Image (spheres, coloured by chain):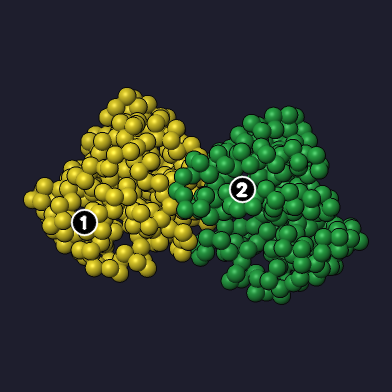
Chain colours: A green, B yellow
Amino acid sequence: MGAPDPSRLSLNTATVRKQWKLAQILDGCARHGIRGVAPWRDQVQEFGLDQTARLAKTHGLTVTGLCRGGFFTGKNWLEDNRRAIAEAHVLGAQCLVLVVGGLLFESKNLVRAREVVRESLQEILPEARQAGVPLAIEPLHPMQAAERACINTLEQALDLCDALDPGGSRGAPALGVAVDAYHVWWDPKLEAQIQRAGSRILAYHICDWLVPTRDLLNDRGMMGDGVIDLPRIRCWVEAAGYAGFHEVEIFSELDWWRKNPDDVLATCKQRHRECS
Amino acid sequence: MGAPDPSRLSLNTATVRKQWKLAQILDGCARHGIRGVAPWRDQVQEFGLDQTARLAKTHGLTVTGLCRGGFFTGKNWLEDNRRAIAEAHVLGAQCLVLVVGGLLFESKNLVRAREVVRESLQEILPEARQAGVPLAIEPLHPMQAAERACINTLEQALDLCDALDPGGSRGAPALGVAVDAYHVWWDPKLEAQIQRAGSRILAYHICDWLVPTRDLLNDRGMMGDGVIDLPRIRCWVEAAGYAGFHEVEIFSELDWWRKNPDDVLATCKQRHRECS
């Protein structure tokens, strides 16, 4: 397994969101020679959509994704996803990442939640296609099935893609997947499903699974500090034809969110090169 | 969906292990009219194997499982599993529950860990068969893949069963599964895989998934306090032909391990009837 192309590093802005505003993050990426960025919508709204687009362009940054649309099982999902698609279009984002939502309000019916996600995707997909914004379903770790996403395996996400966007399997999909190593590394069918995904892979996210993990949401590790065999998964992703960015996304209440953000970015660069 | 048969309730002794010794737990089951019990081996060792078998018999308790064998990726697995099989035989346990083990020491190679589990199962299976002790692979939640079990879906477990014990799919399997609702409730293929499992289902475990979950290991909920649709899953399990016990297994550092154990058992009975 060869080392990853350093120019493929992208920074998900959540990684240093506690320390920096969005403009500082974009400047930081430029200063550290990081060529891709994936911002969160609340940060974009705070800084301004046009300002964000302009500053990213000034720095020559590729917007590898906009986080996030989805939450189809919650209120006002349609309006919110329309806005997200419009914002992704303005930013020229390579995809809109979808965290699809968990259980419906006061319901334990996971089967129904998954139907709602499917129906909502079907409704919003033509608008995304028209706007030229590919939608990337991100299967989340099963430990987040109740609260954040009831799509929990790559197989399940790809079954949806095949059903709703059958033409997309031959390239330029309107509906694809964001493969986040943190969410899928445990999956016994991972290699096979990555191979199946092929051109459906719209984004590849990395960080590490810490042992022990102290919190279900905000205790992700820096690449190399945990147990995920990241080089192996990257090879599978590359073998499937993916040649896009490797987006570092670390939620870390106890560790990386408390560090000097310049040090965090420098570490991301180093660990991307050495451990990913 | 009808209510569950109250006589099918079994108590996994971990549920009150912080409050009571094993003898007290067996007495407690008898006092509360709970007809099944699944002890842990460290508790059995402390009380004595023959004493445990005798007291369970005195109370007319069915030993619905012995916890646990497995940890094939650790040291001394062969000796330990031989002892576990012998103990399960003496106790007349309906199965030996296998927590198969996570990653190998200082390794990130999950693929290899899974091969080791398969090879170890293949080695130990003839001895279990000879002792008349069915082995129940328990797929654990993916959040425990690194540390406790690299078998993480029912499909993966059943693939192993079919490969290593092909005759068992027609009934009286030597190798089957323990279906624990807590570990598998999120699985998009759950209904189909339970149906496939059929007579491979050697045990059915229940508790609940709390929102939020504060700890990856010891924050399980009492039936009804979380989001798992337990009646639905029980119906799937019963439709697959399973007519055995429903074993309550709750690891709860912050809640149930701190309560009066008689109250815990009374609550288990009530919630089994009303919420399972």
Residue A62 location in percent, x, y? 83, 54
Q: Is residue A245 visible?
A: no
Q: Closest to the observer: A69 or A275?
A: A69
Foreground label between 2 and 1: 2
Look at mark 1 in the image and give the residue it sits on.
B44
Q: Residue at x 81, y 42 (%)?
A: A132
Q: Residue B241 is drawn in which quadrant?
A: top left
- What amino acid is labelled 2 in the image? Phe
Label of residue A72 in the image: 2
Q: Closest to the observer: B235 or B38?
A: B235
Chain letter of the residue carrying label 2: A
Residue B107 location in percent, x, y? 54, 53
Q: CA distance from mark 2 to mark 1?
A: 49 Å
Residue B143 location in percent, x, y? 49, 53
Q: Residue at x 70, y 51 (%)?
A: A79
Q: Is residue A67 visible?
A: yes
Residue A55 vs B156, above or below: the answer is: below
Q: Secondary structure at mark 1?
A: helix
Label of residue A215 in the image: none
Most distant residue in the left direction: B58
- What amino acid is labelled 1 in the image? Val
Q: Secondary structure at mark 2?
A: loop
Is residue A240 toward the left or the right of residue B195 in the image?
A: right
Q: Residue at x 25, y 61 (%)?
A: B264
Residue A163 vs B124, above or below: the answer is: above
- Is disc 1 surrounded by few (<14), some (14 to 19) or many (20+) residues within 10 Å? many
Residue A134 location in percent, x, y? 75, 42
- Is disc 2 surrounded by few (<14), some (14 to 19) or many (20+) residues within 10 Å? many
Chain letter of the residue carrying label 1: B
**Same chain shared by disc 2 and disc 1:** no
Q: Residue A52 is drawn in which quadrant?
A: bottom right
Residue A250 vs B74, above or below: the answer is: below
